[in-house]
Amino acid sequence: MDVVTSPARISGRPLAVWIYSGLLALIGIVLIAGGTRLLSLGGSSYYLIAGLLTTASGWLTWRGKRLGAWLYGVLLVSPPTGRARCPCRIRSWPAGWTWSSWPRH
């Protein structure tokens, strides 16, 4: 007798979908908290926006909507716009410099 095992399911969806969407929402909440702190210190709003989109993606995925996956995909391919407005005076790397030799404040 062949026994075919199927993945664990909750409300008709695989358990992996529930875990994935819960992790997305959790990561989004952490990004919202960090992004809010960064914005209050005068930094970029990218992480706050990324946290909101990640949380929304997790919530939509939790509800079984494919829009959640598309929203997260858009977030992954979108560049951080805060980097485009860098007020740095150095426009290119001097010869021999690496990240480890970059001055830190």
Image (cartoon, rainbow, N blue to C red):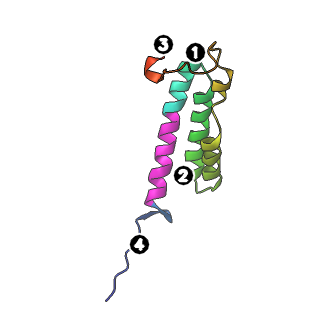
Amino acid carrying mark 4 in the image: Ser
From the top left corner, tell me how far across and down residue 58 is, in percent: 55, 46
Q: Please give the range of residues in magenta.
A: 15-29
Residue position marked by numbered label 2 in the rendering: 62
Count of number-bearing discs: 4
From the top left corner, tell me how far across and down residue 68 is, in percent: 61, 50
Q: Earlier in the sequence, mark 3 or mark 1?
A: 1
Compute the Cα span from label 1 to label 2.
Answer: 31 Å
Which one is closest to the eye, mark 1 or mark 2?
1
Q: Label 4: few (<14), some or many (≥20) within 10 Å?
A: few
Left or right for 70, reference 17:
right
Q: Is label 2 in a helix, a strand or a loop? A: helix
Residue position marked by numbered label 3 in the rendering: 103
Residue position marked by numbered label 4 in the rendering: 6
Left or right for 82, reference 94:
right
Magenta highlight on residue 20: yes
In this rendering, the answer to whether 72 lies above or below 81 is below
Residue position marked by numbered label 1 in the rendering: 40
Q: Is label 4 in a helix, a strand or a loop? A: loop
Compute the Cα span from label 3 to label 1.
Answer: 23 Å
